[in-house]
Amino acid sequence: RKEMVVYSAILPEQIDLSRTRSEGVAGLKGFLEYARQGNPCQPPLERVAYWNEFHPRLGREERYAECLLPENAVVYDLGTVGGSYCAVTETGLRFVTTGGKLAGSYSYDGGYLHRCSLGGDGYAALLLGRYKSGSQGRLVTVDSQGRELASLDIDEEVMSLSAAGKYVAVLYQDHLTIYDKDLQEYAVLKDVSAAGTVLMRSDGSAVLTGASAASLYLP
């Protein structure tokens, strides 16, 4: 068993969902409620109303749309990229429209998926390894039609990967590098050995977290 300690400067009851349509804000409120109680809780009525109003398809039993994935495909993650759904599988990415049509796909071409982030503005960021383990690999950005935007060979151990807006944050063992979606270097922060995870933000800043502390990096 593992324990996660959450520090927050805001309480869930201070988040008013009637003033925003942001899915992220609704998710944050639910997470804070869960973290405080330590077990799953019934969503507040205001959050239920939020989802019912802005996500009327959720909660229905009838099938809305479907798209077949390759046989025996293992899906590691499912999110949205550029208005399409993105299924992250063990062999590649599959982009599907809200109507269930295949919008595009991207193959790892024999590489191994080490890390993936779907938070970019219209693109996904991937770390593909040459082997199942080891530091040799490629950092890749892919748009919502499965087209490779950029690729960068790396030979360093990557601790964490996070994309947001037009930025991609890669946390190496001893430094943090922020790239743009074309994988051109935007900023570098050295001496980050205490950090284990990075969370990229769309404004170009990044949050670094470690075992006992967190810090905000402003390039």
Image: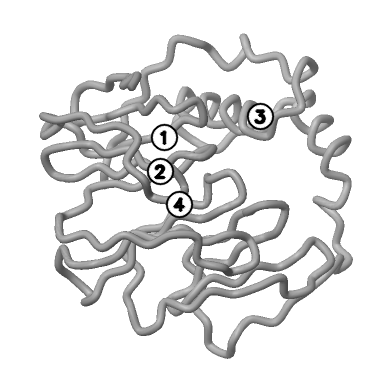
C-beta proximity under 8 Å, tags 4 and 2: yes
Q: Residues within 10 Å of mark 1 (few under 14, many from 20)?
A: many
Between label 2 and label 1, give the one nearer the viewer: 2
Who comes first in sequence, dot 1 or dot 3? 3
- Binning the other alpha carbons within 10 Å of mark 3 as few (below 14), some (14 to 19) or many (20 upward) gives many
Give the residue pinned by disc 2. 168
Q: Label 1 to label 3, Cα distance in Å?
A: 19 Å
Determine which residue is flagged by label 1. Answer: 200
Q: Which mark is residue 185?
A: none
Left or right relative to 88: residue 109: left
The residue that disc 4 covers is: 117
Give the residue type at disc 3.
Ala
Residue 180 x/y as whole percent: 43, 42
Q: CA distance from mark 4 to mark 2?
A: 9 Å
> Mark 1 and 3 residues: CB-CB less than 8 Å, in contact?
no
Q: Nearer the viewer, mark 1 or mark 3?
A: 1
